[in-house]
Amino acid sequence: MPGKYSLLKESWIMILMYTLALIMVFVLTIHLLLVSPLTGKTFDQVLTYSYVLDNLTYYRIVFGLLLYAAVIHGLNGLRIVLIEWLHIRKFQWIINIIIVILMAILLAFGTYTLIVL
Amino acid sequence: MKVRIRRYDGQKEWWQDYEVDVKSSDTVLDVLNKIREKQDHTLAFRLSCQMGSCGSCGMVINGLPALACQTRISELKTDSIRIEPLYNYKVIKDLVVDLNEFVNKHRSVKPWIIRKNPEELEEAPIEFKVTPEQNLTFVQFDYCIMCGICLAACPTVAIDPLFLGPQALGQAYRYIADPRDEGFEERIDILDDSHGVWRCHFAGACSYVCPKGVDPAKAIQFLKKEILKYRLLHKKKAATKPAELVEKAPPPNAPKPPPFDFKFEGGV
Amino acid sequence: MGEDKKEKRYKTGLLRSLWPYNFNAERYSYTLHRITGVILALYLIAHVFEIYHFALGPVAWEQTIALLGSLGIWEKIGLWIIAGSALYHGANGLRLILNEVFGMLLGKPVLPEYPYTPTSLSRNQKIAIYVILAIVIALWIWAGLYLLEGLGII
């Protein structure tokens, strides 16, 4: 019964995975460069409140994109690992729903953080 | 030479050691035959053609799945051989594994030519032309002998027995790439499943162990590409064009051979 | 097979699937890709909640940083592993996109001839894997030096 226990066709999920992966290559690079030696600061200095606030507000779109891409790509990856590992077709929807709820929680917390600043 | 074999008799599993005299030209299958003939007739293993074209004698030799009849002792370059049944399969006895699931997976991807008009296959007034170039796009994957070795090597099959496996997916691509086939949509419904083609993560172990050079990993990546092309661009197997229908050529009017003249010349 | 229904698969399971010994380089990279992916996904969950403390104001943020700082060198080692995971997962993921989406680095279908070297695991693929490893290891060492700098070790 293909597709019966999944929310979307697997190929569309994978298209999403590949697209988000390509987006993340760019936005995650920016994110990592902001905490890298190229900033001219030591690692403890890049974690200070003022520096992080500057970055989060200046690159708000980048971090928003990163949040959504990383949460969806990462948790879907976890879902793939779980449905392969547990491989019970009947209970697959439980894994799917847990993952979707977790995604929603993470996106809510992350979006709140980005909006409130 | 010391040979360690993983035994199983339905209740218990154990390792058993044998000491066998071998020639340098012997294959692992020859060694197993020697053990069965001279030392232990209870040892069970499958064999048929002994020349690598039936795919019966797949087993794990020194940790690598291979055909026993194609693996020479001298190639192994070790003092002892360790022989186990294929990984990821249910063991029936000793080295004999249960291939039912494997065959059912193969059957589930419809490994035959599908035409929208089935009469074209039943009683064909026409024939399908496949040029040598078109043939080359799928003939490699047609060499599969269904030995089941690729599933023993596949890391996804190790955790997910529902995964179709490299063999079935490779065969699915073989028929999808076939210019005569029209069953693309029918097949991708089966392949585009939560335990279908996307559970392949290209570890490539199937191609690494394949004894016939079928390269299932390549077929699966091409299959993914074809499915993505179909979903995003609604393009069906752009790799090859559907074959032309050619009117079957009438039997040629071959000239009759001249009657042979039975005439004795000379005599006794 | 009726009497005893204890049909066990031979040498299967999670550890077996992640154990690439004896196999090809691609299978090693599969194992690494999967492990780094799970590390990153779990870290992501923690990281989103960590950053959430930022929205609660400077005091909460300083407390979070102090809490993580109390782990000492283990925090740095953890971050170093996560940095390596991200680098490897990203670089190897790009190779997989080339393979799976564009069908590159695989070669063309050929007529198999003895000794049956599969073209999908051929020279191009190997070069890609080694280039990825070289880049990732170089960047990873760089990240490690940077993380340890703050501890006064270097």
Image (spheres, coloured by chain):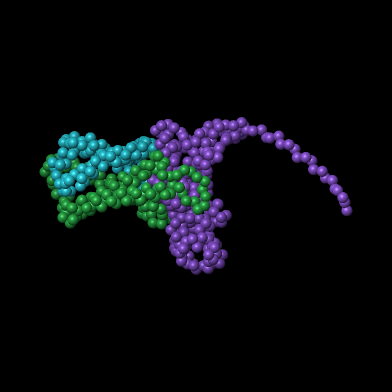
From the viewer's perspective, tell me whether residue B207 is left or right of residue B268. Answer: left
Q: Is residue A45 visible?
A: yes
Q: Colour of chain C?
A: green
From the viewer's perspective, tell me whether residue C70 is left or right of residue B210. Answer: left
* Above or below C93: residue C21: below
Quadrant for residue B23, please give it: bottom right
Residue at 50% of width from left, 58% of height from top?
Answer: B71
Residue at 68% of width from left, 35% of height from top?
Answer: B252
* Above or below B204: residue B68: below
Spot occupied by residue C150 in the image (x, y as percentages of width and height): 16, 52
Along the line of sight, which residue is nearer the eye, C126 or C18?
A: C126
From the viewer's perspective, tell me whether residue C20 is left or right of residue A33. Answer: right
Q: Is residue C72 visible?
A: no
Spot occupied by residue B255 in the image (x, y as percentages of width and height): 73, 36
Residue at 47% of width from left, 47% of height from top?
Answer: B215
Spot occupied by residue A19 in the image (x, y as percentages of width and height): 33, 37
Quadrant for residue B37, please give it: bottom right
From the viewer's perspective, tell me whether residue B43 is left or right of residue C128. Answer: right
**Residue at the far left in the pictured view:** C59
**Residue at the far right in the pictured view:** B268
Chain drawn cyan in the picture: A
Spot occupied by residue C15 in the image (x, y as percentages of width and height): 36, 54
Q: Colour of chain B?
A: purple
Residue at 19% of width from left, 53% of height from top?
Answer: C148
